[in-house]
Image (cartoon, rainbow, N blue to C red):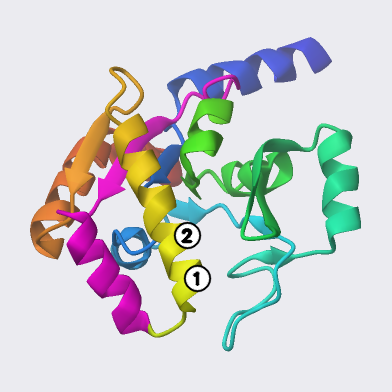
Amino acid sequence: MSWRRSLCSVLAAMVGPRPVVLSGPSGAGKSTLLKRLLKDYENVFGFSVSHTTRKPRPGELNGKDYHFVTREKMQEEIDAGGFVEHAEFSGNMYGTSKAAIQAVQAQNQICILDIDMQGVRSMKKTDFSPIYISIQPPSIETLEKRLRDRQTETEESLQKRLNAARVDLELSKEPGLFDLIIINDDLDVAYSKLTKILAEEIQKAQVSKKS
């Protein structure tokens, strides 16, 4: 019976909806698009909660916004092969665990991952086979204005984010790296493009929920 259950699991994974990777610089609008997607398709999508060693910001909840862990604990899990991707930014570690993805998939939901360019390349080496989407600002100037309007960054951290964004936007031009690049100049237009490319997977998930 065990091999039959395993075969059924494999077949279900092959025909089921694929995970979704959203990548792009901070301030590009990923979070806004994600919140709208999760609201409109509440029982279809599940957000993969990342791990980080940074301290929670005001209003952030452990297990919802991030899994806030110590550097020692996170490094221990990375060494044990428990992460599909991880990176360090501004002295803090960030990463996506296999367990976080599997927790969403266990609920028959499309798993959403919000990861950086290094994470995208790491995901390419896994068997998860997600849809890769890059969310980008119309310009670096627009991105800078959005980050400044947040009033959550020091000048030093803001400049680091802008420099990282320039690198990421250049790297995103690599042919075949992303299935779709969305320039988030108009939120409604960007959201329409996002839901259009995900329509087939959304339908699969909805059918799975009904069956």
Evaluate whether residue 146 shows in this view. yes
Which label belongs to residue 156?
Answer: 1
Q: Up-down: is 132 above or below 134? A: above
Q: Is residue 31 left or right of residue 2?
A: left
Q: Give x and y (percent) for residue 149.
A: 29, 82
- Other-residue count near label 2 (Cα within 10 Å), few / some / many at <14 / 14–19 / ≥20: few
Evaluate whether residue 25 shows in this view. no
Quarter of the figure that contains the N terminus: top right
Q: Nearer the viewer, residue 141 or 132?
A: 141
At numbered mark 1, what does the secondary structure look like: helix, strand or loop?
helix
In the rendered structure, are the residues bearing label 1 and label 2 in contact, judged by CB atoms less than 8 Å apart? yes
- Label count reads 2
Q: Give x and y (percent) for residue 120.
A: 49, 33
Tell me which segment is drawn in magenta. 124-150
Residue in view at x 33 percent, y 46 percent:
166
Q: Which residue is mark 2?
A: 160
At numbered mark 2, what does the secondary structure look like: helix, strand or loop?
helix
Q: Nearer the viewer, residue 10 or 177?
A: 177
Which label belongs to residue 131?
Answer: none
Residue in view at x 36 percent, y 23 percent:
177
